[in-house]
Amino acid sequence: MVRFTLRQCAYFRAVAEHGGIAQAARILNISQPSVAQAIEKLEHMTGLMLFDRHHARGLSLTLQGRMFLKHVEGLLQQAEQVEREAAALAAERAGEIRLGVFWTLSPFYAAGLIRSFHTILPGIVVRHQEMSLVSLADTLRDGTIDFALTYERGAELSDMALIELAAPKPMVVLAADHPLAARESVNLHDLADEPYVLLDGPGSRSYFVELLAEGGITPQISYVSTSMEAVRSAVASGFGFTLLVMQPPSNLTYDRREIRALRIENDIRPLRIVLASRDGMHRGPITRRFTDHAISYFAALGEGGR
């Protein structure tokens, strides 16, 4: 346990720099006995002889004192840095936000959201990690992350504070040579007898299956994958149609086949993208700034957040 104080070290440095107790006391604007007592205690606690005493010429550093001064200067510089950083934290100019992102949303939003926030508040570090819907909910509850960028469906979030960022509607994805691919929109009933390619992600399966069921459609599932790009490739290869909420801007799949994304004419409910957090998390200045920025960022992307 360190017994000497930063104050004693600061007094020692002042005496060393100005050559005497009286001079240091004047610079520090404190009494001479306070400085003298601090030096005596510092020497006693360290076991060092820091100064040679000269009645006519004041004090001069000993060899031990010169070596110790180097360590004291480093210690005081670190203490001053800690003080500056603490002040920045108190003024909400520095800090850290732990953000979890659902992995299918990450390539569309995470980098842009984090980068644009850093431009506004460069002292705030946003550390993000990609997770499944269920993992996002669990880590929010145990405090491992502060926010989750996720869908409202697919995991239990009823005990969380949810802020809607976007409400994109799904689109029908067809192979480019499909008879309906030249249209701008399609009615789901026109595809009722066609095979379906299923994106089997947590939350995605139930959302799309329920959406089709609400329209009285129960298609035969011809291909299943947890990968969005694998689903797109299967559609392009003729396995059937699919529904996707997030759609990459390119109509080319990884195997260089073409697909088309069509608007759905039926009245269907969107899949909300939300910023989830534990209740009360939005009350701090840093978290409020991040929340407000996320809302503005998605609003700037336009309808549906795309």
Image (cartoon, rainbow, N blue to C red):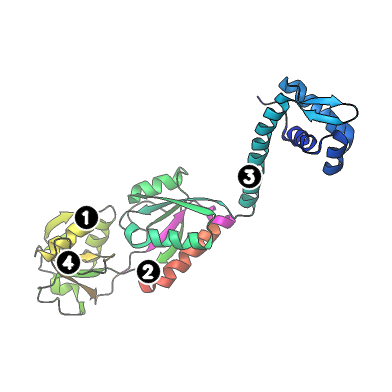
Between marks 4 and 1, how big is the CA–CA gap? 23 Å
Between marks 3 and 1, how big is the CA–CA gap? 47 Å
First in sequence: mark 4 vs mark 3: 3
Between marks 4 and 3, how big is the CA–CA gap? 65 Å
Mark nearer the viewer, 4 or 3: 3
Contact? badges 2 and 1 (CB < 8 Å): no
Residue 89 is at least partly visible in this image: yes
Q: Nearer the viewer, residue 301 or 43?
A: 43
Badge 4 marks a residue whose secondary structure is loop
Indicate the amino acid at tag 1.
Answer: Ser
The residue that mark 1 highlights is 227
- Circle 4 packing at 10 Å, graded few (<14), some (14-19), many (20+), is some
The residue that mark 3 highlights is 81
The residue that mark 4 highlights is 217
Residue at the bottom extreme of this rendering? 183
Badge 3 marks a residue whose secondary structure is helix
Residue at the right extreme of this rendering? 56
First in sequence: mark 2 vs mark 3: 3
Between marks 2 and 1, how big is the CA–CA gap? 21 Å
First in sequence: mark 3 vs mark 1: 3
Q: Is residue 247 left or right of residue 292?
A: left
Q: Nearer the viewer, residue 70 or 1?
A: 70
